[in-house]
Amino acid sequence: MSNLTPFHIAFPVDDLDAARRFYGGVLGCGEGRSSDRWIDFDLFGHQIVAHLSEQPRANAPGNAVDGHDVPVPHFGVVLPTSQWNALAERLKAAGVPFMIEPYTRFAGEPGEQSTMFFLDPAGNALEFKAFADMGQLFAR
């Protein structure tokens, strides 16, 4: 697999202080530039930007995957297994409720992966994954 370049995503939040506590404190993201309307975070080398929005969020539909109702849309990062395990423990210690508890899906199949889903304080769904074999990331 080639070296990846950082991605960028901007997403709505209804409380910048809550976003700062969650992304900075719970997830351990470094903070970059900010204003009274947005905050840049370093999510494992990727630039994510929480933008203050007063618009109510619609409940997103789910999609059935491996017997679970996966929220759509969602975003996250594929991590090395050791970092994924450490993040799962940090989230549990912080009392973050999981939409889908950490587990391994597609066990014994192409694309076997560990995954977990949870919401940020604004209701944005996040998924973090780990592959024991990163060569399986795009397996068919």
Image: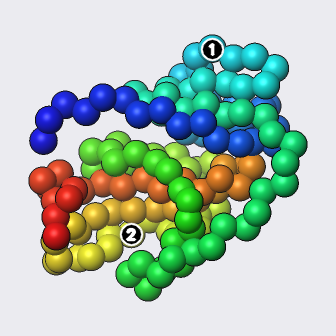
Residue farthest bottom in this picture = 67
- Kindly identify which numbered label has been placed on residue 33: 1
Image quarter where the C terminus lies is: bottom left
At x 51%, y 77%, the residue is 63
Secondary structure category for the residue under label 2: strand
Left or right, 50 with respect to 30, comes to: right
Q: Is residue 102 above or below residue 133?
A: below
The tally of labels here is: 2
At x 27%, y 45%, the residue is 80
Foreground tag (2 vs 1)? 1
User: Residue 3 at what x, y percent from top left?
Assistant: 19, 31
Q: Amino acid at mark 2?
A: Tyr
User: Residue 11 at what x, y percent from top left?
Assistant: 64, 41
Image quadrant assignment for residue 16: top right
Distance from disc 2 to disc 1, alpha carbons, whole Å, reads 35 Å
At x 67%, y 34%, the residue is 50
User: Residue 12 at what x, y percent from top left?
Assistant: 71, 42
Q: Is residue 10 above or below residue 56?
A: above
Secondary structure category for the residue under label 1: strand
Q: Which residue is mark 2?
A: 103
Image quarter where the N terminus lies is: top left
At x 56%, y 65%, the residue is 72
Q: Amino acid at mark 1?
A: Arg
